[in-house]
Each structure stands twice: as structure tokens, then as C-alpha cells.
Image (cartoon, rainbow, N blue to C red):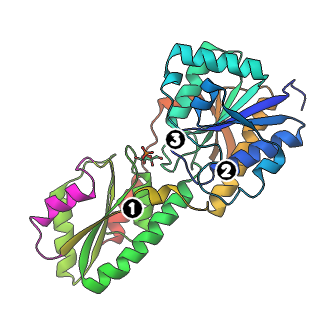
Amino acid sequence: MKTGIQKIGVMTSGGDSPGMNACIRAVVRTAAYHGVETIGFLRGYEGLVESDWVPLPTSAVSNIIQRGGTILKTARSVTFRTPEGRRRVYDNLRKLGVDGLVVIGGDGTYTGAKTLLEEYPDLRIMGCPGTIDNDLYGTDFTIGYDTAINTAMRAIDKIRDTADATDRLFFVEVMGRDAGLIALRTGIGSGAEAVLIPETPTDIDEIIALLERGWKRKKSSSIIVVAEGDDAGGAFAVAEKVKTRLKAYETKVAILGHVQRGGSPTCMDRILASRLGAAAVEALLAGRSGGACGLLHRDVVEIPFTEAIKHNRTINPNLLRLVDMLSC
Ligand code: F6P
């Protein structure tokens, strides 16, 4: 591939997710394979504004494919949100001779890349979807989601043991400030009685009715998975509302929190990160820019940042129905 690209930059931004390191590794190794040098900007857009970077020879990414977090760190940059901040990013990239950039992150990261390209169209930027929330349009899965749902599911398996032993009802809160995709799949995988998500209105009466039906059928314990951004509130708020009216069960709350963001990525996440990191570099080398790489129906695809940002990821109603059917 001959496109005149000699040096590319890579950074991770927004909430970290397991597999970001595997993606950085893929970027560095793919670039090296094509004879291109890579540098890594630290703390997302902040590193681009401040020209805070590290060289990334192939040896710098040895032994990181299995590590959670991100070796490049991540942060939210206030300065980048200003036109002056973005001017500094442009100047820094030009000074450093960086001809292409790979940004790894979520919605905010893509929005930043899109704004930068609108102001400086001569830059070349590609994106990889790194977030545990799986809430990006244009990819079936985001890097880190599979690990996060497996972490949450394993935690709920443990909660189920004690819930069963003590005949209790547990409200388990999982991450997802704006999206219920972690809650939905985790709920199905852990056999939850109900899943409460921001995308659908939560009806407390319905939950109470469901739990009462279960109690009558001699169901001695129950698990309800609540996304942190549910419209009825988090797990504590929902538990409070249910508890006052349902005396059958002793009720407990467990908040899984940031444990879902860490840990060694699953094989699925490592492969996804490797494929998309390599695709982003090869897209830059082929002269393309402004695209978010994703995986749709097993194939690597690219959609414009504008599209990825504009559309909300929708919830598959069949999965919601499955929760209802399997909890009877
Ligand atoms: O990574 C996405 C996410 O996990 C959301 O689901 C969650 O609400 C948010 O990050 C919390 O991020 P932080 O604690 O870093 O602000």
C-alpha cells in the first residue's frame, strides 16, 4: 500500500474498555507491517492538545493483548472542546508529521473526530468502537462489551447462589447510563426474572405482579437486572419502590459498578479489537478518512462518523420478549 503515510497516531478516549490494548496493538503491528511508524497520544484528546505522546515501536505493544484498561490512558479533555484547543491539535499533528490518526472510543470520541475533520479536512482520521456499553450505531458489537457482560453475568451467578440459599430478591445494577444493552444480554445470560432499561418505560406495578406470580409458583428467590440509567432510577430506587408494596421477599441490592469496565478481555473482544484496529490502519493507508470501523454480520465495515453519531442503537425487541418468555 503506497499512500505517502509515514507516521500514524493512536489514542484511546472516553470510558476505557477491555480490548482497547488489543486494538492499540493491532494498530501498531499493522502499521509496522506496512512500514509505517506509530506514536501513541496519552489521555485521549488531552494528549493531542498538549502534544503528550510516546513512541510505539512494535515491542511497546508486546504482552498487552490480554490486559484490560489502556496503556495510553484515557480522559475527558475540556480544552479540546474549544476551537483553540482543536487548533493546537492540528498544529501538533502537523509538527509531529503525523499523517493519520486512529481514535478508539465511543460516541464522544467520534464526535470529537468529526468536529476536527470539519475544521481541518486535510487531516485523516479513522475510528474504532471502544466502549463497554455497545451503544454505537454501525457495529454489531463494540470492543469491551463481551467482556463486560461476561463479568456481570459471572457476578450475578454468584449472587444467584446466595439469593437462592437465603430466599431473597436481588436488584442488581449494571452499567449503562444511557443504554440498556449491558443489562439486556446480562439479564438473559444470567436468567434474570426481569431487565429494566432506559430504552423502555419501567412499570413498577408490572414488576410487582411478576414477582407475586413467581412467589405463588414457589419461586423462592429472584433476580432483577437494572441498568443504571433506567427511567425508574437505579437499583436502589427501584428496590425501594417495590419493597414497600411486596412483602413476600426479603429484598437486597447489589451495584456491580466499575468492576464491569476492567479485567482481561474475552477472546471475542481481542479478535474484534484486532480486526478493527488493523482495518482502521489499512483504511488510512488506502487513503480513506472520517470512518468508524465496525463489524456487521461478521464483516468489517466502515460508516462515516456523522452516521455513527446521528443514529441511536436500538434494542432488539425479540431479546426483550425472550426475557419475558423465559421468566414465566
Ligand atoms: O463506559 C461507559 C460507562 O460505563 C457508562 O455505562 C457509565 O455510566 C459510565 O461509563 C461511567 O463512567 P465514569 O465513571 O468514567 O464517568
Answer whether labels 3 and 2 touch (C-beta < 8 Å): no
| In the depicted structure, whether residue 92 falls above or below residue 259 | above
Answer whether labels 2 and 1 touch (C-beta < 8 Å): no
Is residue 190 among the parts visible in the rendering?
no
The N terminus - image quarter = top right
SS class of the residue under badge 2?
helix
Q: Residues within 10 Å of mark 3 (few under 14, many from 20)?
A: many
The structure residue drawn at horizontal position 60% and vertical position 13%, both measured from the top left corner, is 119
**Is the CB of the residue bearing disc 3 within 8 angstroms of ligand 1?**
no
The structure residue drawn at horizontal position 51% and vertical position 30%, both measured from the top left corner, is 77
Q: Is residue 233 magenta?
A: yes
Is residue 146 among the parts visible in the rendering?
yes
* Mark linked to residue 21: 2
Answer whether labels 1 and 3 touch (C-beta < 8 Å): no
* Mark linked to residue 256: 1
* Mark linked to residue 136: 3
**Residue interval drawn in magenta:** 231-249
- Say what amino acid the circle numbered 2 marks: Asn
Left or right of 301, for residue 217: left
Q: Residues within 10 Å of mark 1 (few under 14, many from 20)?
A: some
Pinpoint residue 313: horizontal percent, then vertical percent.
Answer: 46, 41
Q: Earlier in the sequence, mark 3 or mark 2?
A: 2
Q: Earlier in the sequence, mark 1 or mark 3?
A: 3
| In the depicted structure, whether residue 151 falls above or below residue 317 | below
SS class of the residue under badge 3?
loop
* Mark linked to residue 86: none
